[in-house]
Amino acid sequence: MSLLVKICGLSTRETLETALDAGADMVGFVFFPPSPRHVSLETGRDLGRQVKGRALKVALTVDADDATFDNIVDALSPDILQLHGQESAARLRDIKQKFGRPVMKAVPVATSADLAVLPGYAAVADRILFDARAPKDATRPGGLGAAFDWHLLEHLDLKLPYMVSGGLDADNVAEALRVTGAGGADVSSGVESAPGVKDPELIKAFIRAARATQELSVR
Ligand SMILES: O=C(O)c1ccccc1N[C@@H]1O[C@H](COP(=O)(O)O)[C@@H](O)[C@H]1O
């Protein structure tokens, strides 16, 4: 399967267009008010319309309730729900059943003990997204530009597609993909000039760098 590149935290028409033009497979929209990338339902609806099937639309939420999902599904019509909070496997099952969308569960990683949750999620999630565990006092559980030790995933045996994220940028994405064996890479801070401000040149450079790893592996 070909490598998936996700650009997350898009909030303007211009930077969304850059990501789509540059060939992003997934574009992510953050529905989490404490985040500098949070988009309103109205903006999500507008950006969602702009995608027009050129990439998969991902709605990022953190421990959202059913009413919030109802509103997001109505506004964005996401292809994937990214669950970036402490949602249990039972809650994943419930969300899938109620909203009929594939779910990508973010798993925070700091030590090998963090991987113990995988068997529970593997039975219900459609995809896993490994991200750096946020510090206890962080205002959000991700999007902090921090990486984790990718070697923790080196011998992973997961019968589910997975992506890597956390502190990625154009300079380190190739190494992150090589070490983790992930089928995709997800970035937010690494393509920004300031928190929440996406930089078109950094978006293009990230997608180019990730795609270059794909060319290497088919040779
Ligand atoms: O981007 C955010 O603000 C955010 C808020 C809450 C949960 C997750 C968030 N972002 C996701 O975190 C990872 C890593 O981001 P970064 O590249 O290190 O900035 C990525 O999946 C973002 O989509």
Image (tube, rainbow, N blue to C red):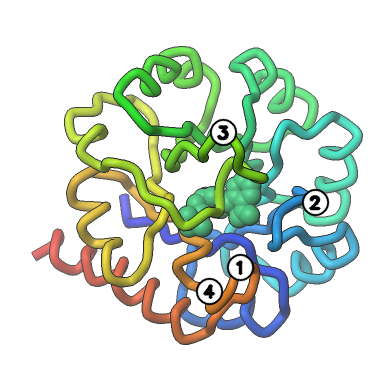
Tell me the residue at 45%/67% (across/down): 190
Q: CA distance from mark 3 to mark 2?
A: 18 Å
Q: Which residue is mark 2?
A: 33
Crowding near the residue tagged with mark 1, few <14, some 14–19, many ≥20 C-alpha atoms within 10 Å: some
Front residue (pair 54, 161):
161
Q: CA distance from mark 2 to mark 4?
A: 19 Å
Q: From the Cβ of disc 1, is ligand 1 less than 8 Å away? A: yes
**Sequence-earlier tag: 2 or 1:** 2
Q: Amino acid at mark 2?
A: Pro
Front residue (pair 166, 120):
166
Mark 1 lies on a secondary structure that is loop
Q: Nearer the viewer, mark 3 or mark 1?
A: 3
Q: Are marks 2 and 4 in contact (CB under 8 Å)?
A: no
**Sequence-earlier tag: 2 or 4:** 2
Q: Which residue is mark 1?
A: 195
Q: Which residue is mark 4?
A: 192
**From this viewpoint, is residue 79 visible?**
no
Number of numbered tags placed on the structure image: 4
Q: Quadrant of the C terminus?
A: bottom left
Please identify the quarter of the rendering in which residue 83 is found: top right
Q: CA distance from mark 3 to mark 4?
A: 24 Å
Q: Amino acid at mark 3?
A: Lys
